[in-house]
Amino acid sequence: MAASIDQVSGKKFDFIVIGGGTAGLALATRLSEDEKISVLVLEAGPANLNDPLLLTPGRFGIQFKNPNYDWAFVTTSQKKLDGRPVNWARGKTLGGSSAINFFAYHLPSKQDIDAFEKLGNPRWNWDLLKKYYYKSSGFIPPAVKREEISYDIDQRNLNGPVKYSYTMNSSGFEGPYLEALKSLGVPRVAEPFAGEIKGAWISPVTINPMTKGRSYAANDYYEPNADRKNFTVLNNAYVAKIDLLKVNGIATATGVQFIYEGKTHKVLTGKEVIVSAGTIMSPQVLELSGIGSRKILDAAGVEPIVDIPGVGENVQEHCYGGITYEVKEEVQDQFTTFDIARDPAQLEKQRTLLAEGKGALAISATAMTFLPLAAISPNAEALNKDLEKTIDKGIATGRYSPGLQKQLKIQLESIKEGYPNTEGILEPGFMTSPDTSEVGKKYVTLISLMHRPFSRGTIHIASNNPLDYPKIDPHYFEEQYDLLAFRELFKFNRRLARTEPLNGILGVEINPGAGCITDEQIEDYLKKSCNTTYHTSGSCSMLPLQDGGVVDPQLKVYGTTNIRVVDISIIPLHIGCHPQATAYAIGELAADIIKGRALQEA
């Protein structure tokens, strides 16, 4: 139930979940299935239920920098981006980032998940996580199966909470995109939910074709169960810290302090406190509570209670850049793009069309390709060899910690074995800067996304004031390979644009334009224009403590008896895909761990 402050302040709940986002609501909903336990969710943002600005497909990104929906984080100035900071949007509302994301819903490769186990997490592998991907999702087969769509119905659960399907309307670019890739030797993936994603395919989206709206944690986990008397949600509750009692060197959470309408309140826990505040705010909550690196805490004026140097470390971030083309005038009528929805005079018409599953608001960016660098660049072998030399030298000179060395070795091995570390997306619209789009014209942007970065960043508290945002430093491109591989993917997408049948559709290159030719110019453009993909992970890594870990395989914070972290901050080595489905799966698995139904022997 949605609660008032009087129903929460000073009260006691068995489980307190900090963060009502993607993983947090999945976890809380499953825990509340047991009527004998009480569950409280503290969400910093408003509920925003039934809000058209969140629900309407084709309106993604419009919520960014709006304080009613978005934390609107900003990174520190990035040395390798010529001092440029980067805006990091994150959902500050019930449902978290599942409420404002770009809808992509798919699974990673089997090897991505098996790496968790290799890094010291028994039974955290594909066979385990696949069960929870399946449990959390409810596939709605398309009424008409378009030629470019491919799936195996036996790999899909039809009855889970999160509804997903394929876009109600096609932009028209998907088929030509796949055909052009085929001409360049890129295979189609028949079923990307089976653990193999190398190649090209059409991604499903978390849009329910029955409601014509977004499917997310708030309307598919929380709302159907909101009347449970043991399931309490308090919105606009900004967590300040976890109260800890330390006995014999082990800390126990006794409750949580939070700020509501400018006043600090406390709530008590009878069993556990679960931090599900996301990759950015979960380390903030732990550090404000005295859990983290003594050096960081001392500098911020926080009393160290549990010394865990890994809190806020090992941050891994996907980034993207794009090339925008004008669609040739003579073929524009054959295609649908988001551009028309930017025209206020057209927007109401598009909303009417959406009710019929038609128009620009009924499409999404779904045409994707996941490839290893060796499949897209003639320079891959040289770049990969240079990378290996750099890593070997870094290990020999002590540049990398023993824990990070284990991750880097797995990453190098994945390159040798040909697993994807790049992603391309066809975006039906103008999606680069500067935006020089003209009303009445249509555009296509070929997006380049770099996965599995070798650079590692940090997220730490800036002070002991809980209202101060954390200091976010992703260390973009501090491992040069990340930038060079990014450049090669950009060049591949440019080559793809001049491959038929795309070549017959795409006209003038708008951004970066014909003046961006040399490798140095391309690198400069990417540094000036690249952005976050909102996929950050690793800040509370599930690793052995000596390897920089924050939580153990039961997701329990080291040195505590009853604190867990449940969100994608626990991912120890980043997955090469969009992480929405994985966030839900982690929430589902965590609930079963707590209930004693999973990892009992770990």
Image: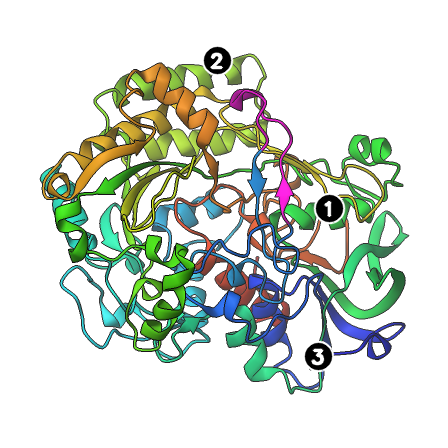
The amino acid marked with disc number 2 is Lys
- Decide: few, some or many residues near mark 2? Use Cα within 10 Å; few <14, some 14-19, many ≥20: few
Q: Which residue is mark 1?
A: 284
Query: Which color scheme does this rendered protein use?
Result: rainbow
Most foreground residue, 174 or 138: 174
- The picture places residue 458, in percent across and down from the top left corner, at 64, 34
- On the question of residue 340 being in view, the answer is yes
Q: Judging from the image, what secondary structure is the residue with disc 3 in?
A: loop
Q: Residue at x 17, y 43 (%)?
A: 328
Q: Residue at x 37, y 56 (%)?
A: 107
The quadrant of the rendering that contains the C terminus is bottom right
Give the Cα distance between marks 1 and 3: 26 Å
Asked if the residue under mark 1 is in contact with the one under mark 2, i.e. CB atoms within 8 Å, the reply is no
Q: Earlier in the sequence, mark 1 or mark 3?
A: 3
Q: Is residue 562 left or right of residue 555?
A: right
- The picture places residue 583, in percent across and down from the top left corner, at 51, 58
The amino acid marked with disc number 3 is Ala
Magenta residues (range): 72-85
As for residue 73 lying within the magenta part, the answer is: yes
Please tell me whether mark 2 or mark 3 is closer to you in this view: 3
| Residue 210 circle label | none
Q: Judging from the image, what secondary structure is the residue with disc 2 in?
A: helix
Asked if the residue under mark 3 is in contact with the one under mark 1, i.e. CB atoms within 8 Å, the reply is no
Q: Earlier in the sequence, mark 2 or mark 1?
A: 1
Q: Is residue 227 left or right of residue 189?
A: right
Q: Which residue is mark 2?
A: 393
Give the Cα distance between marks 2 and 1: 33 Å
- The picture places residue 33, in percent across and down from the top left corner, at 61, 82
Q: Judging from the image, what secondary structure is the residue with disc 1 in?
A: helix
The quadrant of the rendering that contains the N terminus is bottom right
Where residue 97 sits, quadrant-wise, is bottom right
